[in-house]
Image: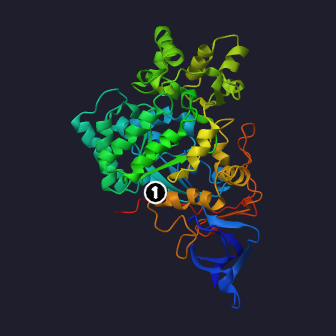
Amino acid sequence: MEELVIRDADVVDGSGADSYRADVVVDGGRIVSIVKEAAAAGCQRPRARRELDAEGLVLSPGFIDMHAHSDLALLRDPDHSAKLAQGVTLEVVGQDGLSYAPVDDRTLEEVRRAITGWNGYGDDVDLDWRTVGEYLDRLDGGIAVNAAYLIPQGTVRALAVGWEDRPATRQELDRMRQLVAEGLEQGAVGLSSGLTYTPGMYADDAELTELCRVVAAYGGYYCPHHRSYGAGALEAYAEMVELTRRAGCPLHLAHATMNFGVNEGRAPELLALLDRALDSGADITLDSYPYTPGCTTLAALLPSWAGEGGPEEILARLAHPATAERIRHDLEVTGSDGCHGVPVEWDTIEISGVTAPALADHVGRTVRESAAARGEDPWTTARRLLVEDRLGTTILQHVGHEENVRTIMRHRAHTGGSDGILRGAKPHPRAYGTFPRYLGHYVREAGVLTLEECVAHLTARPAARLRLPDRGLVREGYRADLVLFDPADVAAGATFAEPRALPAGIPYVLVDGRLAIEDGRRTDVLAGRAVRRTPV
């Protein structure tokens, strides 16, 4: 007898088709049969060792978070309710060009320092891997949700070139190509970049094109955080479209937003650019989060020249009065490339987390508010935070536009991504609320998407991008990564005031056919594993 039958579910199968009522039977981690209500009439209904009454609940594929920063959290926090409670059963990590493989001892220490604000320093995790394959093997030891990995181009450049702002030599480019190929052979699904973060931003288009050709040869995709989401946003999007066209590489645009005042109301221009490329045969997808503010580190706003040489050089420049003044001018007057070419507005920069306990009273205030409380100018406060927190401060940037968010999420190439940073006293609520917010606010309350459309955006479409032949749909033979939610009640609990509150209306989540969330409570199931690239 099979393990589980989910009885009387309203199945939204991920395809975009209308829902239907059915009994769904799960065994051995897969969906073994689907008996629709009409087919069940007059015949014996399926039985199993356990029955789950799904009356009034929607059954859908588990949600796929196409942009996650859980690289260490998956190993640090076996519970991982931040994502499981949302119905997420697969995350894509290794984002924005900086993560923890491939590395050597030097590069690992540099990366740990550079992205402490994203993942913590990592002294509570045994970072005993050096290759992509070894990192994936660690994930195979049992994690809360499944995880796929993107090779981080900035980390690759740090390993082969260093943190210098210069073109790679032919020998260094060959080494980077080799590192990317090895990572893909070991199971990575593609390549990410952070082209407003050092050292990845020092790569020119020719270098990136060469790496994307390697990615294309292995059937992966390129996921850039491109060079500007502000003053040069449309040009930056066009650059990525053209670069991947030349390389013959699929493109997935990370957190595809149109932010800052210069881009208010301009989402249709972005989508027109993408539609022209799609209509000409380009393979393009994108992800977005259903909120207006962004989230990054305070150090990310600095101009690229200030980051050359790595974290210790940044701190040395901040400590030098004349150099710090030059940084201030770039931030406040010119508009640094780290802040997307837009002069920083300190009243839009909210401090969301610090690593030094002595700085905790800054959290929850904008830089301008924190400076005013201390009787100093905002740059003095920002500079002190950068130095005393050793670049570990995280921020929210309140620079988005609701009409752009809604317009982009309707697009035919759209998928969902939380871009969730789980560290800090007041993280962005998207880390805990992205997927129920799509379903509750934008489907039920605002009607921006139908339920069937939204589920397709969060399941089948990302699975297709990842080239996963047995995930993303409720189909016989597919993996039983499933979520049951109440369409009348599902909602994000997380808010900017209470960013770690768990969602409502998601009582059951199955990973590999096992209940990881049952009756709204986390079980001890650790059924997640690394999801490796499907060979071409």
Q: Position of residue 492 (x, y in %)?
A: 72, 49
Dot 1 alpha-carbon crowd within 10 angstroms: few under 14, some 14 to 19, many 20 or more: many
Q: Amino acid at mark 1?
A: Arg
Residue in the picture at 73% in, 41% down: 495
Residue in the picture at 51% in, 29% down: 300
Q: Position of residue 346 (x, y in %)?
A: 62, 21
Q: Tell me the quarter of the image containing the N terminus.
A: bottom right
For residue 409, side relative to residue 323 (left or right): right
Which residue is labeled 1 in the image?
Answer: 465
Way the structure is coloured: rainbow
Residue in the picture at 66% in, 67% down: 59
Front in this rendered view, residue 392 or 293: 293
Image height of 81 relative to 114, above or below: below
Front in this rendered view, residue 61 or 246: 246
* Residue lying furthest left: 170
For residue 444, side relative to residue 257 (left or right): right
Q: Position of residue 89 (x, y in %)?
A: 59, 59
For residue 159, side relative to residue 514 (left or right): left
Front in this rendered view, residue 469 or 394: 469
